[in-house]
Amino acid sequence: MSETFYLNGEEVRNEPVLYRACGLDEIYLLNGYDLEDHDGEQYMSVSKMEELHQAIGRYLVTHRKGLAPKEIRFLRNTMNLTQSELAAKLGNNAQSVARWENGKCEVPGSSEKLLRLVFLASLLTEAEMLALKDFINSNLSELDELDENMTAQGRFKLGDIWEETPSDERMLSYA
């Protein structure tokens, strides 16, 4: 008896199909593909492959605890970047990216976090990128204004928990 799979309430093919073309293990497609026979061999054609790769990448950067070497390579390729171009965006060198992709060393935590952000930013439209830039700039301006108007350093006291005290108090106090 064959199992039936559903996606958003709609019946899809009887069995998920392993998608090997992305270079990752354990990626299965439920729909959006056709299987064709040519000269006795079966080939898969995928609809909207770029969008599929973006969806896979979005999943990797938002759901995976640590990125595997194949996943780093996949993200770089999905962004259409060379190792040198990705390295420049991450503040590293191409040899480091090559070592991460070959599994010869682990990605430092800060570089992995930045890679996740760079990938998510690559998915933004130009309008979304401009809106994000404006949002960041306006918030940085507010922080600059706070810095300029700051007359005293923050003061904290230890009660049941640490708490900020008014700026006219001159020292930390214990309860």
Image (tube, helix red, strand yellow):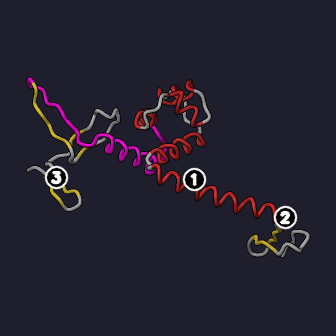
The residue at which mark 2 appears reads as: 153
The residue at which mark 1 appears reads as: 133
Separation of marks 3 and 1 at Cα, in angstroms: 41 Å
Nearest to N terminus: mark 3 or mark 1:
3
Q: Which residues are magenta?
A: 39-68
- Identify the residue at horizontal 52%, vertical 41% (top origin): 115
- Identify the residue at horizontal 54%, vertical 27% (top origin): 84
Decide: is 14 above or below 147.
Answer: above
Separation of marks 2 and 1 at Cα, in angstroms: 30 Å
Q: Is residue 67 magenta?
A: yes
The residue at which mark 3 appears reads as: 12
Separation of marks 2 and 3 at Cα, in angstroms: 62 Å
Decide: is 49 above or below 145.
Answer: above
Camera-side mark, 3 or 1: 1
Nearest to N terminus: mark 2 or mark 3:
3
Q: Position of residue 66 (x, y in %)?
A: 49, 43
- Identify the residue at horizontal 27%, vertical 43% (top origin): 48
Secondary element at tag 1? helix
Secondary element at tag 2? loop
Secondary element at tag 3? loop
